[in-house]
Image (tube, rainbow, N blue to C red):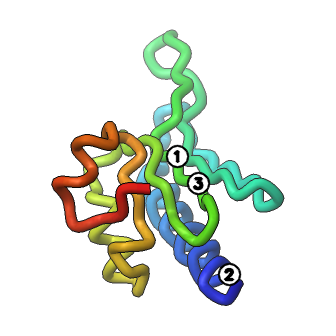
Amino acid sequence: MENIETYRACIKKLLAELGQANLSDDGVESQIIMDTEHDHYQLVHIGWQNNRRVYGCVLHLDLKGDKIWIQHNGTEVEIAPTLVAMGVPKQHIVLGLHPPYKRQMTDYAIV
């Protein structure tokens, strides 16, 4: 359980940093969505730009068991190495955005 609390803190810090980096004055805002009961975490962009609606998930992370699952990464930041630099072991990170047969070719967890 200690790891889970540490991983939650890492995810929250990462989302806060990425959310701040994406702030702009163009009518699009970054929103951090955290479901701490079910351990789903997202960064979304929402607003209007050039009379067009902007809405989309930029980053989606889940905590499943004792692992962080990277479900979607629409940022330019490599999330897995960033989490490793924050102290999360590679074997506790699952690249859920890749199919299982590709995951086994990485240094990260398969499931």
Q: Secondary structure at mark 2?
A: helix
How packed is label 1: few (under 14 Cα within 10 Å), some, or many (20 or more)?
some
- Indicate the position of residue 53 as horizontal and vertical percent values: 55, 15
- Give amino acid for label 2: Glu
Q: Which residue position is annotated with label 2?
A: 5
Residue 33 place in picture, x, y as percent = 68, 49
C-beta proximity under 8 Å, tags 3 and 1: yes
Q: Is residue 51 left or right of residue 86?
A: right
Marks 3/1: CA distance?
A: 7 Å
**Residue 25: x, y in percent?**
49, 41
Amino acid under label 3?
A: Asp
Query: What residue would you read off at disc 1?
Result: 60
Three-letter amino acid code at the position of disc 1: His
Element at label 3: strand
Residue at image position (62%, 53%) is 41
Which residue lies most toward the right here?
37
Callout 2: 10 Å neighbours few (<14), some, many (20+)? few
For the N terminus, the quadrant is bottom right
Q: Are marks 1 and 2 in contact (CB under 8 Å)?
A: no
Label whose residue precedes the other's in the sequence (1 or 2): 2
